[in-house]
Every structure is written in structure tokens, then in C-alpha cells.
Image (cartoon, helix red, strand yellow):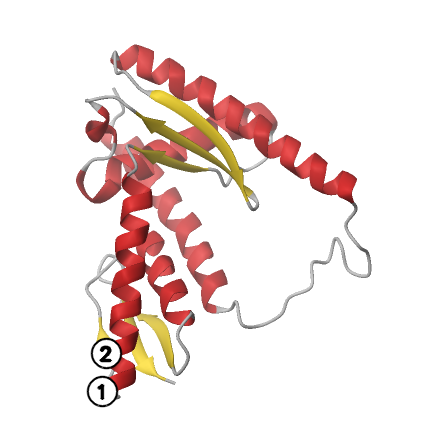
Amino acid sequence: MVETEQIGAVDEAVVDEAVVDEAVTEKSATPEVDEKTSGEVASDDDDDDDEDYLVEEGEIAGDYLEQLLDVLDFDGDIDLDVEGDRAIVSIDGGDDLAKLVGRKGEVLDALQELTRLAVQQSTGERSKLMLDVAGWRAKRRSELGELGADAARRVLASGEREELTPMTPFERKIVHDAVAKIDGVASESTGVEPSRRVVVVKA
């Protein structure tokens, strides 16, 4: 059983990772040059190496999660994939899996960070893998994308800024991405955790 202090540390690590992702999203309009590839064209071999590494990450994560499911006596099918620069690991099919999601995905976030740490212990490299359980994260991503797009359209029509409800860094990033797809509006984050929220304004 994981102690309260350990869960708190895991949650802080999850927030730190997501804050970085959100900051990157908010600066995505500024072109950046990768210092490691500046002046060079990435070869197909490099791409293959990257994908092989991500597949390895997924396999390590899958083994770790399979052992966890065995300990918990939960049923579930583990699916591995690669999307961009992340390994994607999904657990589906079990009736008890909702317990691994928790309230507003809090247990899922903690489990994702534990899985990343398990991968890092094996590879020596920090992992950015994404974990989903029972399709919760995919469904939440779709809901938040619609929420951001709807808010953007309302702001575009009225010209009035709109503040959304407080969200986690992961949720805010999805909303920022959705708003960025609509011309004439912009978004920013305001407030302090855990009450930090997205504000949509007319550009």
C-alpha cells in the first residue's frame, strides 16, 4: 500500500511534468531549433532508433503494469503504441479498472507517474509515456477539446473574455490546443494551483 507522503510526491511530479507541457503549448507559435539537430537533417535511421526506444519503453511499462494487475487481481488487456515522441500504454477490458482512474483521474495520474519511474529505473532516461485506463483519458481529451472550441466560438461572437473552471495542467493544455485552432481568439492561464484556469480572449 502506498503511503500518503509518497502519493503527494507523485502528484507533484505529475503536475511539474504537465506544467512543462502546458508552457510548451503556450509558446508553440515561436519556432524553435533543436540544438542537437541544428544544421542537420534527421536520418531515417535516427527515426527508427527513436521508435525502437519508445517501443522498448512501452514494453517495460506493459510488464510493470501486468505485474500490478496481477497483484491487485484485476483483469485488463494492455495495449502498446507509439504516438509522436511518446509511448502510449492503455489498459482496457476489466470491470475494476475504474478504481485505477479515481476521482478526476487523480489515481490515473499517480499510476502514470509510477509507471514512468519504473521505465526510468530500467532505461536510465526520463520517460514521457502516456497511460490511459478504460479510455478515460481519451474521453476526457475529447470533452475538453469540445469545451475549448465552444468557449472560443462564444468569445469570437461576443468579444467578451471567458474564464473557464479550474483545471489540472493536463486539462488546460488540451483546452489551449483547442482554442489555438480557431482564428481570432487566444487563451492564457491565470491563477494559482489548484485554482488555475484557462481564460479565452479575443485576439
* Position in image of residue 183 (x %, y %): 42, 79
Q: Which residue does the image show at 38% across and 35% down from the upper left? A: 112
Q: Amino acid at mark 2?
A: Arg
Q: Is residue 192 visible?
A: no
Q: Is residue 51 above or below residue 29?
A: above
Which label number is shown at residue 194?
none
Q: Quadrant of the N terminus?
A: top left
* Position in image of residue 171 (x %, y %): 31, 55
Quadrant assignment, res 122: top right
Q: Residues within 10 Å of mark 2 (few under 14, many from 20)?
A: some
Q: Is residue 198 left or right of residue 21?
A: left
The residue where tag 2 is placed is 154
Which label number is shown at residue 158?
1
Q: Amino acid at mark 1?
A: Ser
Q: Is residue 60 visible?
A: yes
Q: Quadrant of the C terminus?
A: bottom left
* Of the pair 22 and 148, the residue shown nearer to us: 148
Instruction: Determine whether the residue tagged by mark 1 lies in a helix, strand or loop.
Output: helix
Q: Which residue does the image show at 42% across and 59% down from the upper left? A: 22
Q: Are marks 1 and 2 in contact (CB under 8 Å)?
A: yes
Q: Is residue 57 above or below residue 188?
A: above
